[in-house]
Image (spheres, helix red, strand yellow):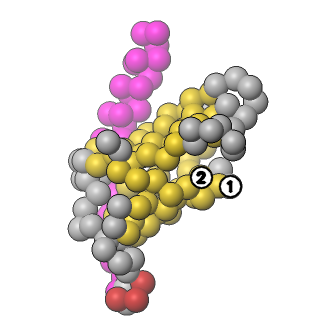
Amino acid sequence: MKTYQNTKLTLLLFVAATMFTFASCSKDDSASDTPTNAPASVADTEWEWRDNNYTSGVIDVEVGFNGPKLADLIYTDMSTGIMQTDVLIGTYDYSNGKGTLTLNDETNNTTVNLSFTVSGTSMTLSFRGITYTLTPKQ
């Protein structure tokens, strides 16, 4: 348990340290590319999608935006009959209703880049071949 906590703490410190080294370039987006009712920021918000009937095998997808750059995605799957929860941690960029999550997937030992859009009270995110529409977490 202590090793898991040390690994998680090390990963969080690594993400925090590397976020300062990222440089971003901006491009001119046309107004037609901006989702309607896009919030100015997603910082300090949490979003969720739930399948209460368990029809897809995926039970829950949650995305949290922690401050101006850190993010996490919690994915709970029961399609194999055994509940498996994956926690991915990393960073995000967001502007004009569009964003990108750059997350460490320790289950598959990879880094994943996920695009998402936010319009009003809906976030659309594709993950592991399925598109989810998340709503603000209550």
Does 56 appear in magenta? no
Q: Main secondary structure of the magenta part?
A: helix
For the point 70% across and 23% down, the residue is 82
> What residue span does the magenta drawing correspond to?
1-28
Q: Amino acid at mark 2?
A: Phe
x 28%, y 44%: residue: 66
Name the foreground residue: 12 vs 68.
68
Q: Residues within 10 Å of mark 2 (few under 14, many from 20)?
A: some
Q: Residue at x 69, y 38 (%)?
A: 57
Q: Where is residue 85 shown, x and y percent of the image? A: 57, 29
In magenta segment, residue 20: yes
Of 20 and 90, which appears nearest the observer? 90
**Three-letter residue code for mark 1:** Gly
Report the residue marked by disc 2.
127
Question: What is the x, y in percent for residue 49?
Answer: 49, 47
Residue 65 visible in the shown view: no
Residue 86 picture location, percent across and down:
56, 33
Q: Is residue 63 visible?
A: yes
Q: Are marks 2 and 1 in contact (CB under 8 Å)?
A: yes
**Left-right relation of 112 to 63:** right
Image-quadrant location for residue 59: top right
> For the residue labelled by badge 2, is the local secondary structure a helix, a strand or a loop?
strand
Q: Considering only vertical position in the picture, is 81 above or below 120? A: above
Q: Which residue is mark 1?
A: 129
Looking at the image, which residue is at 37% across and 85% down?
29
Q: Residue furthest top?
A: 1
Taking the view exactly as shown, the residue that stands out farthest to the front is 53
Residue 113 disc label: none
